[in-house]
Amino acid sequence: MSEPIAVAALREFWRACEARDWPGLAATLARDVVYTVPQTRERVRGRDAYVRFNAEYPGDWHLVITRLVGDERSAVSFTSFTIGEETMTGVCAVEVDDDGLLVSLEDWWPEPYEPPAGRSHLVERF
Amino acid sequence: MSEPIAVAALREFWRACEARDWPGLAATLARDVVYTVPQTRERVRGRDAYVRFNAEYPGDWHLVITRLVGDERSAVSFTSFTIGEETMTGVCAVEVDDDGLLVSLEDWWPEPYEPPAGRSHLVERF
């Protein structure tokens, strides 16, 4: 069963990250890839800088894909990241170019927060 | 151009929300729909409760879809929510049942945070 191009590209991207396979990671990226973190208003431009960004990311982190959906041009992944005792969910939305290389990645890191008041009559907690 | 089923269902869901079309919203949902907010560990079970949850959501909120990707079974949307002066991005991951009705929705609300130290040599701010 073959996956849509953007889905397969993002799956290979995460495989290479988890394996610390930096040449493999570079092979998934367009030369002019742009990586954006909207929550911090950070941006990394270009394949070389973005491979370094990942290679230098501190800590003994590991990841598993928990959700991956998309089509031939766009995909979104949910990943569970673990660093030591801490686990976080990352959301990554990507697009590929005509060669199937990742040309934009947008990364989101939602944190826990307290539920708003006034809706406990409809909601259960887990 | 016809969209994949889960994509079309999620697009109609957001149209109905923005229009305060609660019967229309109910028509997109399976009777046993489950809505989950992982960040607050909240869950709403069932179509009636979940329609009320949306109908009772406070404030004069408005939304536009900024990204929507998926296939016949699953989809993910990014929406820009505005309440008064405040704008937030919401991420919603859904699945549909065999009838094309939304049977699970997982909602995420990432907040701004400060960039970690040690990567400013690779990163620009915007």
Image (cartoon, coloured by chain):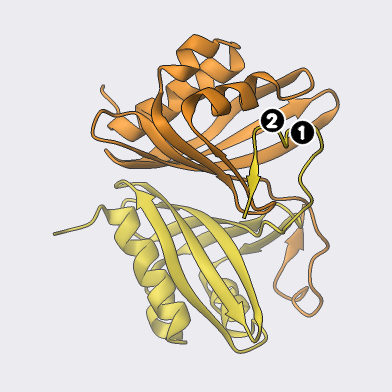
Chain colours: A orange, B yellow
Q: Position of residue A63 (x, y in %)?
A: 64, 24
Image quadrant in which you'd find residue A1: top left
Q: Which mark is residue A81?
A: 2
* Image point (64%, 85%), residue name: B56
Q: Are marks 2 and 1 in contact (CB under 8 Å)?
A: yes
Query: From what the image shows, is residue A42 above or below residue B56?
Result: above
Same chain? Circles 2 and 1 = yes
Query: From what the image shows, is residue A64 above or below residue A120?
Result: above
A75 sits to left or right of B112: left
* Image point (34%, 54%), residue name: B6
Image quadrant in which you'd find residue A83: top right
Tag 1: amino acid = Thr
B59 sits to left or right of B81: right
How crowded pointer 2 is (Cα within 10 Å; few <14, some 14-19, many 20+) is rated as some
Q: Secondary structure at mark 2?
A: strand
User: Which residue corresponds to mark 1?
Assistant: A87
Image quarter where the C terminus of chain B lies is bottom right
Between residue B53 and residue A121, name the one nearer to us.
B53
* Image point (25%, 28%), residue name: A99
Q: Position of residue A38 (x, y in %)?
A: 61, 53
